[in-house]
Image (cartoon, helix red, strand yellow):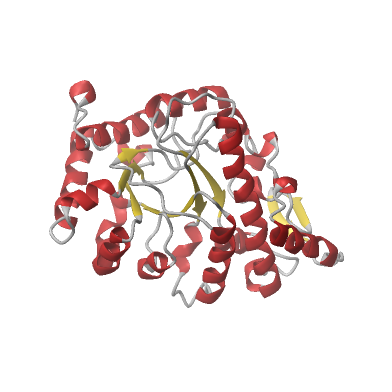
Amino acid sequence: MAVHLASPGSLATGIGSLPHTDPVKACDEVIRIFPQLPYAPSLPNRGILENIVFCDSECLPGRVIREERLLVDREADLSGVMEQIYLDYIEGNYSPYAIATEYASGFHEFIKRKFLSPFALKCQVTGPVTFGMQVVDAEKRPIYYDSQYADVLSKLIALRARWLEQTLTWNAGGTNTLVMLNEPYLAALGSSVVPIDMDTVKSGWHDIADLLQGSIGIHCCSNTDWSFIFSLEPGVVSFDAYATTKEFLLYRDDLFTYLERGGVVAWGVVPADNRVFSGETPESLYERYMSIRKEVTSYIPEKLFDAQSIITPSCGIRFATETESCNIMETAAMISAHVRGNKINERP
């Protein structure tokens, strides 16, 4: 059963993807900038297999990659493969769900590194809603709308997530692990155009959380039903605080309860899009964060807010140069340092 993350005390970290194609350089930068809460970077610019969804699709029953699209072939008999996933889930047999280097070069480089007493080690996996909504069958119907496939998918992702956290513990020496579910499609909660059944979401969430031993979180970079997300009691809720704080804080009562129970919020206050980031400064983004902090702490104790917060970019950083991506990450780290009272480099 997943556990809550210990209080991070306004540390900084990244979200997931970077524009780098060299995993050694990518990990060098992440560990340099976020030594206390480093994360295994995803490197989608290396090729399609390292893109979201594709990177977690190795064991997907009926998987077909055609014209750079991920599909499932329902004509073949998949019952045996699905039954094996159920059996492996029940037995906790996660070894067959290891991720190959060509799907996660950043992760494989990351676990080679030595870390000096980090607060936690972080990685990410595609969440079942986003996975199931992006993969379709021959009739172009998302597999998430097939109840059996949705059920198998959550267990498949749970086994992959369990392998990831255990590998972090074994290879990288981390005592605390954080696996984030990358779930942009949760923005569709409550939509009549793209209907998502909340009971299916909740069931899939518990499938994953129940198998993990470290902490698990949810990253959704668009607005959603945050009351529902808080009710799942993830260890971390990560969102785009730069663009959607106003909507997020409509759920202030739920937020207060969530933080009091030990939940952590990752405030994505630094724009991950360099076109937006270039119009800001470290000073302006620090002031933006402090403005958010001031508003929230008008009804939540400052000590609780600071203890249960993480500062991040708003999303993964892909559409930027390597230098620009480092500037974005460094700004998140600088804001964190000032909030924590470690005023490195005298900025903001």
The quarter of the picture where the N terminus appears is bottom right
In the rendered image, residue 341, in percent from the top left (x then y), is placed at 18, 32
Please say if 281 is above or below 166.
above
- Pick whichever, 127 or 51, lies toward us: 127
**Going 21% across and 45% down the picture, which residue do you hit?**
289
**Going 20% across and 33% down the picture, which residue do you hit?**
338
Say left or right for 223 vs 206. left
Residue 9 position by quadrant = top left
Say left or right for 43 vs 66. left
In the rendered image, residue 41, in percent from the top left (x then y), is placed at 52, 36
Residue 231 position by quadrant = bottom left
In the rendered image, residue 266, in percent from the top left (x then y), is placed at 35, 49
- Pick whichever, 225 or 64, lies toward us: 225
Residue 22 visible, this orientation: no
In the rendered image, residue 284, in percent from the top left (x then y), is placed at 19, 38
- Number of marks in picture: 0
**Going 35% across and 29% down the picture, which residue do you hit?**
327
Please say if 85 is above or below 117.
below
The quarter of the picture where the C terminus appears is top left
Residue 169 visible, this orientation: yes
